[in-house]
Image (cartoon, rainbow, N blue to C red):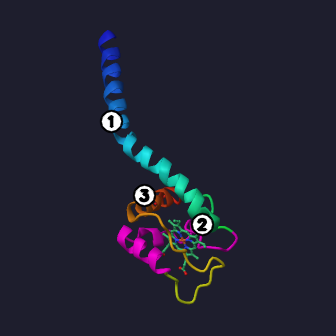
Amino acid sequence: MRLKLLVVAISALLFSHVLFAMDYDPDFDLISEQAVRSYTMECAGCHGSNAAGRNGMAPNFSKEWFRLTKSDDELVGNLRAGFRTPGKFYNGGSCPPSALSSEELVDIFAVMRQFVGQ
Ligand code: HEC
């Protein structure tokens, strides 16, 4: 009986350690806090609080999630070039020029992917 308890306790300990290692990334938490703030200030006006778009200003990335599967480089390039999808019209036109660095934009893309489960 005591041995059984011990085995359970040890496996629980091992298992929680695995979970801890998988879930906890303090660097990402720090990055994403700043990125969420920038997203809210510079992107949410068109992209909405959760990247699903706001008032037809920008695409709903919950539905058009595949757009966020593009590489970070491609997305940065598209954002900086004012990319527009041929044949589509959004009230926001395209992303406006941003003073954010490419690194900051990449952190924001990570947040946007999280919003839409990508
Ligand atoms: C003035 C409104 C507006 C703002 C502000 C804005 N965007 Fe956009 N964004 C758009 C529109 C509209 C599109 C879609 C353009 C199209 O495909 O025709 C778009 C597309 C995108 C895409 C997809 C590009 C692709 O290749 O499919 C990403 C990623 C994106 N925006 C990120 C951002 C980020 C990050 C910010 C903030 C730094 C931002 N946007 C700010 C309007 C905006």
- Kind of residue at disc 2: His
Q: Spatial distance from mark 1 to mark 2, Cα to Cα?
A: 36 Å
Q: Which element is circle 3 on? A: helix
Q: Which of the two labelled residues, at mark 2 and mark 3, occupies the earlier sequence position? A: 2
Three-letter amino acid code at the position of disc 3: Asp
The boundaries of the magenta stretch are 55-82
Mark 2 element type? helix
- Which is closer to the viewer, label 1 or label 3? 3
On residue 36, the disc is none
Label whose residue precedes the other's in the sequence (1 or 2) = 1
Where's residue 50, x and y in %?
A: 59, 59
Q: Nearer the viewer, residue 72 or 22?
A: 72
Q: Secondary structure at mark 1?
A: helix
* Place of residue 21 in the rendered image (x, y in percent of width and height, measured from the top left): 33, 37
Please rate how many residues cluster around mark 1, counting C-alpha atoms within 10 Å: few if below 14, some from 14 to 19, many from 20: few
Q: Which residue is mark 3?
A: 107
Return the x and y of residue 9 as percentages of the image width and height.
Answer: 35, 19
Q: Which residue is mark 2?
A: 47
Q: Name which quarter of the figure residue 47 lies in.
A: bottom right
Number of on-image labels:
3
Q: Is residue 76 above or below residue 37?
A: below
Q: Compared to 110, does 33 lie above or below? A: above
- Outermost residue toward the right in this view: 55
Q: Amino acid at mark 1?
A: Val
Tell which of 11 and 63 is nearer to you. 63
Some atom of ligand 1 lies within 8 Å of the CB belonging to the residue at label 2 = yes
Residue that mark 1 sits on = 18
Q: Residue at x 53, y 60 (%)?
A: 116
| Residue at the image position 42 percent from the left and 57 percent from the top | 107
